Image: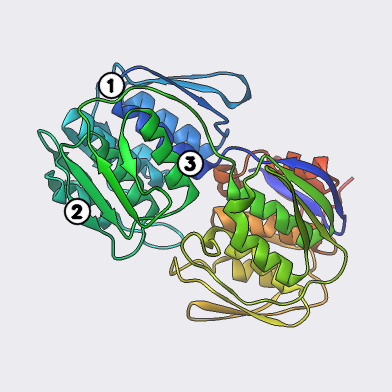
Amino acid sequence: MAHLEIKGGRALKGTIRISGAKNAALPILSATLLSEGRFKLRQVPELEDVRILIELLRELGVSVQYREQGTVFVDSSKLESFEAPYDLVRRMRASVLVLGPLVARLGKARVSLPGGCAIGARPIDFHLKGLELMGAKLEIREGFVEARANRLEGARIYFDIPSVTGTENLMMAASLAKGNTVIENAAREPEVVALGRLLQDMGAKIKGLGTDTIKIEGTKTLRPATCTIIPDRIEAGTYLMAVGAAGGELIIENCVPEHLEAVILKLKAAGLKIKVIDADKIKVKRRRRLCSVDVKTQPYPGFPTDLQAQIMVLMSTAGKLSVITETIFENRFMHVAELKRLGADIKVEGRSAIVRGVKHLNGAPVMATDLRASASLVLAGLGAKGTTIVQGLHHLDRGYERMDEKLSAVGARIKRVNGTPVQEGKMS
């Protein structure tokens, strides 16, 4: 089994280019089910989650072709199946995004229930209730959601809590529905906006993108379109925090600074020097020990839950005491036990983690428990004394494209090793 060996204490210097956003690529790939014809998608990241969804699309009869530099051509003209099997959906929860497009285009869908998740239950109730309001007949049978509708009809849908995938699934379904659909308390994330813009290019009539009220006027048919996947704001935030962990100076390019406003403000308060130097470039520098700051995760445009574990690493060696509160997922502190193995002083009380900064972390073997936890352990290894061995890389590979290569190129002593790790091993 592959693992990472990280020799800490090396400041970073150079430029890191951000990949396309996984959380934008997945719904956009799913949206290709809505129309016949050939889509051209640029800047598609080569990630495990993306590969699984492409495998699912092919299972449904969709033609998917890779080209160089992240360009993918998708053609669902020969869409021949309406069933998303358990073996694929269980490997990635976002596979449920095919539910709305399938029932909207084919009038029927059979999609495996995704089950639980390491960071929380994340039920798909919002998706199902929204489709029911749009006239779909739903039945849960043998672990599958079965949906049928001659043609979906527009409806007014309210989310008790903003749901990103729920908003995306229902936006796609409403684009082919009869009449008008209004989604209230909708998710405002940039990835939702990116999907909405693709749907507009396909011929859908959508208003309110980026607000909590989205209005969709359905149409009978949609057309294929060309799309460039937006840069991954979580990857960009992770590399900003890598400088906070390891020190040094980086330029983060191919990013959207406005997508990171809450993150940048919090990192500046912690003592990082951050400057937007171009429309798609951010310069970050650390020259001293960071200050402790409190953090509370919120739906966009608040501080993202997907960067909670990473900023906890920074607070682990900050000057005083900080409180990090998780409001999105009920079980997203599993990285705490691993950070404590590195010497962090963290106490969890309910949905808050109380972090008392220590002088430095010490390298040790650690195990990733989920995607963002794996990134936090890499950051901790960059700043720790000695060697850190990070296992469970299948989590990391779900959401970070060639992270070890990108960090190595800017001075980190990090390498991917196949085989069983030697806990007291030295890096050459």
Residue 318 is situated, as x and y percent measured from the top left of the image, at: 76, 75
Tell me which label, 3 or 2, sits earlier in the chain.
3
Q: How many circles with numbers are drawn on the protein? A: 3
Return the residue at label 2. Answer: 156
Q: Which residue is mark 3?
A: 24
Residue 375 seen anywhere in this rendered image of the structure = yes
Mark 1 residue crowding within 10 angstroms, few (<14) / some (14–19) / many (20+): many
Q: Nearer the viewer, residue 414 or 288?
A: 288
Q: Give x and y (percent) for residue 197.
A: 42, 37
Q: Which mark is residue 136?
A: none
Residue 339 spot, x, y in % from top left: 67, 68
**In the structure shown, which secondary structural element does the residue marked by tag 1 occupy?**
loop
| Residue 79 circle label | 1
Left or right: 3 with respect to 289?
left
Mark 2 / mark 1, whichever is N-terminal: 1
Label 3 or label 2, whichever lies nearer to me, is: 2
Between marks 1 and 3, how big is the CA–CA gap? 22 Å
Q: Amino acid at mark 1?
A: Leu
Q: Residue at x 77, y 50 (%)?
A: 5
| In-front residue for pair 222/405 | 222
Q: Quick one: SS at disc 2? A: strand
Q: Residue at x 29, y 16 (%)?
A: 78
